């Protein structure tokens, strides 16, 4: 249910309503709007009609059901887009596009430092790099684990770029959170609800990737798992879905951008690297993503793709990334944003 407070309702009235929501067995989530506050009351759907009684409390304008199965992620609860702060002064979801770039996997100090300096030089504002890798084959490189996290932290120190890295297993959440600025949930873990719940309890932004066979509704329900635990800093990432097409690694669902934008207030990021699987397709898909209205990109860049431990064929060389960023700035301008 959405409890819409009156314009000018007092703090005390808001606190009373929150208290009553808890007494009724629901969890209140306050969304501070420009003119008024609303409270999303979430919990067991079956007995939610008891919340209707809140309508008679002082300061309450009305109580309306949330029609979508996802609640806190929906535009019904929060019509304005969410702006997620990912580092002091760095926001996602506003007028400025964010570009996260770096290798698929952290491989060595030299590799991550060289990449970090190069992507920063070209205008990226977040460094990506996998330390725990969810590989399709158990015999493929699984990542440098904590050693990789340490190298990412070193690169952050050297460049000032905040770092995004994937957490694969719930038991590693605490370890990864000690190093990461943004926690990445990979496509293969989009419905790992134990992991999502743990991330919901963290005070860290989360980038949630869409699974390869996840509908938009399922994707938003996964985001809801994180939001329902209290973490509001959730970003969604479309990274290509599985279709019958084999010319590309996945099929980039560009229409997911405006569809998601219509249904949720959460920022939407596009990953053109995993979506296509081929470096030469990454620039055009990045421009298309910006034109479709995304809030940012996450792109794989490697100084020597031919030697990469993972995802070399889809990784841009630093010079290719630099050229793409120049052109991207033009597309961003047309889309009413800046890089
Ligand atoms: C990655 O970002 O390197 C990755 C494994 O992505 P995805 O989970 O989208 O496959
Ligand atoms: Mn990768």
Image (spheres, grey):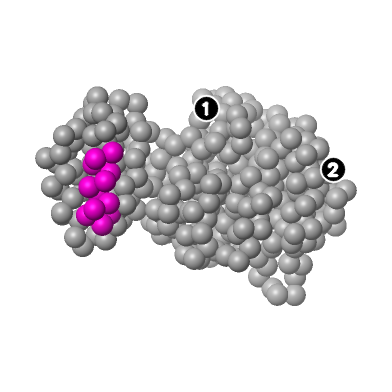
Q: Quadrant of residue 269?
A: top right
Q: Which residues are magenta?
A: 15-26
Q: Which mark is residue 278?
A: none
Task: Indicate the quadrant where residue 82 lies.
Answer: top left
- The percent coordinates of residue 103 (x first, y second) are 75, 50
Q: CA gap, disc 2 to disc 1?
A: 29 Å
From the viewer's perspective, tell me whether residue 267 is left or right of residue 74: right
Residue 281 visible (yes or no): no
Task: Check disc 2 and report its element: helix, strand or loop.
Answer: helix
Check the picture and name the quadrant holding the C terminus.
top right
Q: Earlier in the sequence, mark 2 or mark 1?
A: 1
Mark 1 Cα-neighbour bin, 10 Å: few <14, some 14–19, many ≥20: some
Residue 236 versus residue 198 in the image, above or below: above
Which percent across, then down, holds residue 68?
29, 52
Q: Secondary structure at mark 1?
A: loop
Residue at image coords 24%, 40%: 16
Q: Is residue 20 magenta?
A: yes
Residue at coordinates 60% horizontally, 53% vertically from top-left?
Answer: 184
Q: In this rendering, is residue 205 above or below 244?
A: above
Residue 19 percent location from the top left of the image: 26, 46
Question: Is label 1's Cβ within 8 Å of ligand 1?
Answer: no
Q: Which mark is residue 95?
A: 1
Foreground of the two, 323 or 239: 239
Residue 25 image-quadrant placement: bottom left
Label 2: which residue?
A: 114
Q: Residue at x 47, y 64 (%)?
A: 193
User: How busy is the neighbourhood of tag 2: few (under 14 within 10 Å), some, or many (20 plus)?
Assistant: some
Q: Is residue 156 left or right of residue 100?
A: right
């Amino acid at each position: 249910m959405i409890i819409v407070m009156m314009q000018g309702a007092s703090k005390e009235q808001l606190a009373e309503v929150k208290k009553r929501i808890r007494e009724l067995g629901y969890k209140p989530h306050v969304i501070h709007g420009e003119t008024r506050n609303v409270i999303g009351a979430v919990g067991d759907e079956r007995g939610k009609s008891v919340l209707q009684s809140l309508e008679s409390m002082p300061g309450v304008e009305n109580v309306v059901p949330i029609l979508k199965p996802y609640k806190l992620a929906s535009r019904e609860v929060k019509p304005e887009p969410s702006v997620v702060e990912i580092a002091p002064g760095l926001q996602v979801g506003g007028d400025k596009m964010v570009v996260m770039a770096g290798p698929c996997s952290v491989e060595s100090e030299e590799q991550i430092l060289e990449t970090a300096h190069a992507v920063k030089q070209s205008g990226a504002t977040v460094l990506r790099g996998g330390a725990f890798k969810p590989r399709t084959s158990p015999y493929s490189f699984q990542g440098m684990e904590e050693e990789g996290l340490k190298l990412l932290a070193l690169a952050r120190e050297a460049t000032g770029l905040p770092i995004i890295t994937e957490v694969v297993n719930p038991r590693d959440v605490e370890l990864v959170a000690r190093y990461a600025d943004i926690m990445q949930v990979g496509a293969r873990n989009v419905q790992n609800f134990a992991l999502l719940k743990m991330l919901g309890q963290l005070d860290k932004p989360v980038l949630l990737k869409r699974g390869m066979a996840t509908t938009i509704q399922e994707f938003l329900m996964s985001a809801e798992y994180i939001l329902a635990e209290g973490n509001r800093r959730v970003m969604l990432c479309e990274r290509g879905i599985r279709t019958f097409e084999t010319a590309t690694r996945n099929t980039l669902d560009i229409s997911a951008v405006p569809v998601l934008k219509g249904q949720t207030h959460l920022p939407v990021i596009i990953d053109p690297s995993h979506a296509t699987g081929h470096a030469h397709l990454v620039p055009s898909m990045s421009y298309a993503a910006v034109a479709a209205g995304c809030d940012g990109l996450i792109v794989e860049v490697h100084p020597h793709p031919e030697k990469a431990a993972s995802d070399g064929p889809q990784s841009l060389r630093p010079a290719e990334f630099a050229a793409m960023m120049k052109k991207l700035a033009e597309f961003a301008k047309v889309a009413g944003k800046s890089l």
